Image: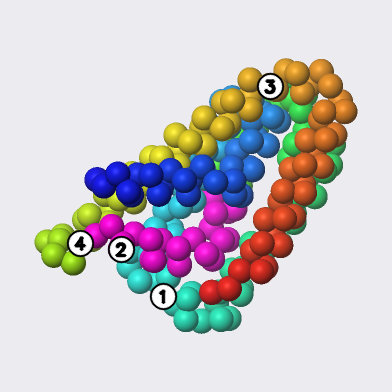
Amino acid sequence: MSPEFLLTSLVIVASPGTGVVYTLSTAFSRGAGASVIAALGCTLGIVPHLLAALFGLAAVLNASAVAFDVFRYAGVAYLLLMAWMSLREDGTLQVDAKLAPQSRRTIIAKAILLNLLNPKLPVFFLAFLPQFVRPSDPAPLAHMLELSAVFMALTFVVFSVYGLLAATMRDRVIARPRVMLLLRRSFAAAFVLLGLKLIATER
């Protein structure tokens, strides 16, 4: 495993994106345990894109403007929905010490959907992973699967750390309604900006 791959992957994973925003919002609204579940969901959401890249399906998205745009606008619509849910007092970012726990399945499903509707991910992995596989490698597919597993492990660890750190401030947030309002607006704005960024992306 090359140091270059580990460093590049760490930078990519740690960069703020939909997964990070979702994990942080879950940490503030549901606590440490739920944030780890959200991190797991975001990690699992990478799997279809990695498989698409490994088996060439990403090339279809890259070649077909229609297919790419369908995924892109579906992703934008979902991000805008997340922004709306973040703004609502009884929505995604509802914070209450007595709040009933949300099922793990629901948290994971939302996280997977966020990543699944990002058409740039399979194209990214198709361009990213082969750079770290030598042409002379006797088992390139196995090597790419190994790299994918490491990338997913880094994603889970980094997102979990983000979530756990955010969860340590949860009690302070609950005690300060103005801070909660600011957080709602900040996360809603983040989801909107990510949606606008997705609209602006080219294949």
Q: Residue 70, image x and y in percent?
A: 61, 73
Mark 4: few/some/many CA within 10 Å (<14, 14-19, 20+)? few
For residue 106, which quarter of the picture? top right
Q: Earlier in the sequence, mark 3 or mark 2?
A: 2
Instruction: Give the residues drawn in magenta, as a range.
Output: 112-133
Which residue has dot 2 on it? 130
Which residue has dot 4 on it? 134
Is residue 133 shown left or right of residue 171? left
Which of the pair 88/3 is nearer the observer?
A: 3
Which residue has dot 3 on it? 169
**Distance of mark 3 from mark 2, alpha carbons?**
40 Å
Q: Residue 144, image x and y in percent?
A: 27, 56
Image disc number at residue 59: 1
**Distance of mark 4 from mark 2, alpha carbons?**
8 Å
Q: Earlier in the sequence, mark 1 or mark 4?
A: 1
Q: Main secondary structure of the magenta part?
A: helix
Mark 2: secondary structure: helix
**Distance of mark 3 from mark 1, alpha carbons?**
43 Å
Mark 2: few/some/many CA within 10 Å (<14, 14-19, 20+)? some
